[in-house]
Image (cartoon, helix red, strand yellow):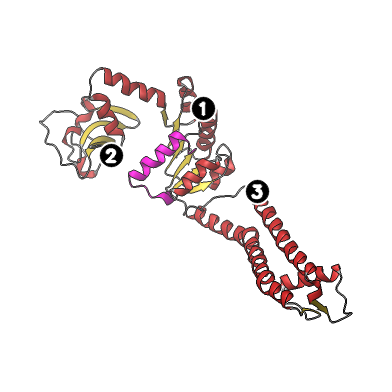
Amino acid sequence: MSSLLTRQSPGRAWRSFTTRVLLVIVLISIAILGHWVEREGLKDNLDGHISFTDVIYFTMITVSSVGYGDIVPVSTQARMFDAFVVTPIRLFVWLIFVGTAYDFLLKGFWETWKMRRIQRDLHNHIIVAGHGESGSEAVAELLRRGCKPESIVVIEQSDTAREAAASLGLNVMNADATRNATLEAARVSQAQTLIVSAGRDDTSILITLTAHGLAPHVPIHTVIRNRDNERLARTAGADTVINPASFAGLLLAGACHGPHIADYMADLAATDGRVSLSERPVSANELGKPLSALTTGLGVRIYRAGRPIGFWEPDANSLEAGDQIVEIVPKPETPPVQMPSGATA
């Protein structure tokens, strides 16, 4: 899946084409030089004289086909040169020709058809705008959590970052995520969520604004590095704004108040810990029950019509339809720990 939605840069394509043309010229030049040196071993059945024009003609005909018989090698040296030098050159030239035709004609049509097919089938996928430091970490965590590589679309303009994303089996687009056409090609309106980590706050905010305008119902999670820009990102349409520096500050401050607080916070955020945070809608058999009665994990918060409700608040004593539950759940291989009634994580 590494080549899906990938678009090769025109500059690289033309460099490849130029290299192949030069290689063909070098190979044909070797054949011409050899035939000119061994011209006494060639016989012209028309006028009996071998000129430089005859050598060029004979070489081109021999390299492109097996010849017409009007000029033939008659000496042993000329025949051996044709057998062991010109014949391999003919094969190499044809391989270069076929490969070039595929790369510049057939491959373009094939990749375009494949890209359109993949785009048509994109649904409930995750779009990652920016595969830099934060974006790549987010992708790695998604994969660790069981997300399939083919369900992730990475939009990235850096060749290095794009190659790293493609090596993971992700769908990759070489495009500008701030443009409507790019997000429409990535089927943002059909996406499950959008992660924005462009590396620059102004670019991330512009991507957020563009995506929110195209698909206001799609959740957008944006990485912002300057605290002053967090409000702008939310105004642009970001549902979640993550500031790496602020989060690191929270962990550091927590560590100052207890040696295990930062460890537990990191445990909740990652998949390789003993517990993790999970968000899900309330189930039918949980309606009317208190948050503390959950059997799937330890309920810590309810979101009711967008309003957060803590486990200690009176409204948490009765779950209602439409509630979103945030709970702490153990990893499957971790044996559940029996907690005393009323204990908190």
Type of the residue with mark 2: Asp
Q: Assess disc 2: are there few (<14), some (14-19) or many (≥20) residues with their C-alpha within 10 Å of its C-alpha.
A: some
Extent of the magenta region = 130-151
Q: Position of residue 15 (x, y in %)?
A: 66, 50
Where 2 sits versus 84, above or below? above
Q: Quadrant of the C terminus?
A: top left
Gap in angstroms between the C-alphas marked 2 and 1: 30 Å
Type of the residue with mark 1: Asp
Circle 2/circle 1 CB separation < 8 Å? no
User: On residue 272, which mark appears?
Assistant: 2
Residue displayed at 45% across by 45% down: 191
Where 310 sits versus 157, above or below? above
Residue 312 occupies which quadrant of the picture?
top left
Decide whether the magenta segment is chiefly helix, strand or loop: helix
Q: Nearer the viewer, mark 2 or mark 1?
A: 2
Where 136 sits versus 345, above or below? below
Q: On the image, numbered disc 1 is attached to which residue?
A: 201
User: On residue 10, which mark appears?
Assistant: 3
